Image (spheres, rainbow, N blue to C red):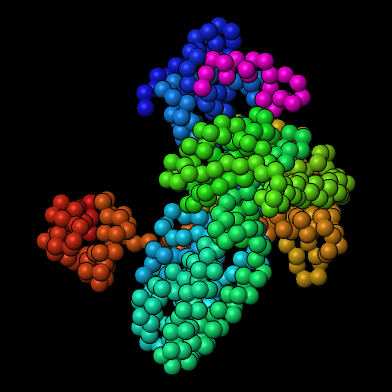
Amino acid sequence: MSQTKDIHPILSPDFLKTIPNSPGVYLMYNRAGKVIYAGKALDLRKRLASYARVQGAAHAKTAVMVSRIARVETILTRTEKEAFILEASLIKEHRPKYNVILRDDKNYPLIKVTVNETWPRVMMTRRKMKDKSRYFGPFSSSTAMWSTIRLLQSLFPLRRCKGAELEKRSRPCLNFQMKKCLAPCMGKVDADLYQEMVRDVLLVLEGRNRELSHKLKEKMALAVSRLQFEEAALYRDQLRALTETLEKQVVAGEDALELDVFGMVRQGQSVAISVITVRHGRVLGQQVFFLAEPVGEDSEVLAESVKRYYEEANFIPRELLFPLLPDDHQLLGEWLTERKKQQVAFKVPVRGDKTRLIGMAQANARQVFSERDAKEKSWDVLAAALVETLHLQRRPERIECLDISNISGQQAVGSLVCFEKGEKSGKRYRHFKIRTVPGPDDYRMMAEVLERRFTRGVAEDDLPDLLLLDGGKGQLHVAVDLARRFNLEDRIELAGIAKEKGQEGEKLYRPGRKNPILLPRHSPLLLLLMRIRDESHRYGITFHRKLRHKSAFASEIDNIPGVGPERKKKLLQVFGSLTKLKNASAAELAAVPGIGPELAETIARFFKGEG
């Protein structure tokens, strides 16, 4: 790809004269030097000039973005297609604030099949990793997901034990006794038969149930012809369960139908996108995305959404349905066709069954706004009650909670969690290792963490409306003193929540108030604050346990330069114990695979105290 790069100070007529009428990509930076928008154009000068004419309510978000531009960088390409590909990689790299970044509105579960393992498993996960496993979903309903897993477990008794490597057992587990596992750990199943079952699992998850149904009928008939009636009964039961599942699935058209259906609804400045997945004529699931204030017209936002959705997709269907054609749909279609290595068609249906699918996708997108509106109304009531009950000066749109975790001062950590409008905001969670407090002193530990939090918050103008502390008057006094030192008394509200003791109930403490605030046990306000406090406990204890585990398994070997986890494992496998390793000669160490003479000398010197 041939590219030339120029950096320009700001959008202006003089600047625009320097931009060629050529294809390319433009990057918009703010004053902090961060990319806030990346776009591509067939004619860079014409495209950038359009931003100078942005005005009116319809372009309010674009106008805000333009007002924050400090400089523009352009990258020229030979063709619009090159610009299209480069734009995608730059958005992926910089994740600009004003570009469409698809974040699932919910953390939907997935089904994972560990096909990369010798004896694969079927399991639930919420994280898609690059581990060569097959992932299916996401499932909008966890009930539907678990129902699918239970069906698969009843049809195909694959192993359920944890661990990628299968450990040999002297006796099979209870699942084998209940005929829910084939016990590969005991060598009771042929590897080829097991892998065939895995392939059948994949057929179900890919929506190819009819293909599997036909396969099971053939197997049943063969078993009957061989007078293997017990085996035939097994295939009959599998077939019956599969037929019941087929009857429950929504039929979207003929068996060969393979498509994704996009719905898009705008409400004010916000946009909701839904994607319905149809495979082999049946609706398998759907995903929804909420875009708070995307930049661009509907067709542009839809085009960006399609790009983001298929950037890392494992599968691209032959046909995509839309309520309106995306911007640059021909270029977008070429890109998807190249990725699939098969023609991908874009269609806007106006009649027939496919218009029903578009209607379903549009209804799902509208539902996103309905759910958000309901959450907003619920939060309005809670926020108003918090202001009144805790005597706050402002609505606590953003609440952070700090907790300290330690055992007698060991492996001490501070955990900070954040809730925005009553919902978790995981991107703002933070862990703090205690650096300056050697012993068990919760007050000094809290002071250290608060000082670090307030220092960053003031520097970045990034502070919560309400900071909740896990503790009573003592912890609250520490926070009040720190807030006063940083001149934050008028910028941040403080409160403490003390753990329940006996029948007293939870106690809420506020600065300037002698007695705690006591709320009824089932008060929605108390339940919210307890939920936030408990989340900080969970987050802190998880990190604390990791540190303890790491410390417990630490060894002198970890301090030897050039010896990592793999070499450490090899050394201990060869010598059997740390004592034998310490007494080994340089020649014996050099004989260990992956060590070599030079590293062997380093290890020997280290244990003699010469390292």
Res. 298 image quadrant = top right
The residue positioned farthest toward the left in the image shown: 587
Q: Quadrant of the N terminus?
A: top left
Q: Nearer the viewer, residue 346 or 272?
A: 346
Span shown in magenta: 42-64
Is 394 left or right of 410, judged from the image as shown? right
The residue under the point 44% across, 87% down is 223
Q: Nearer the viewer, residue 400 or 48?
A: 48
Q: Nearer the viewer, residue 246 or 507?
A: 246
The residue under the point 60% across, 32% down is 327
Q: Position of residue 258 (x, y in %)?
A: 55, 54
The residue under the point 51% across, 44% down is 344
Q: Is residue 549 above or below residue 601?
A: below
Q: Is residue 49 above or below residue 338?
A: above
Is 131 left or right of 601, judged from the image as shown? right
Q: Position of residue 199 (x, y in %)?
A: 44, 69
Q: Is residue 450 visible?
A: no
Res. 146 image quadrant = bottom right
Q: Majority secondary structure of the magenta segment?
A: helix
The residue under the point 65% across, 29% down is 296
Q: Is residue 54 magenta?
A: yes
Q: Position of residue 275 (x, y in %)?
A: 63, 49
Q: Is residue 347 above or below residue 611?
A: above
Is 33 left or right of 245, judged from the image as shown? left
Q: Is residue 138 magenta?
A: no
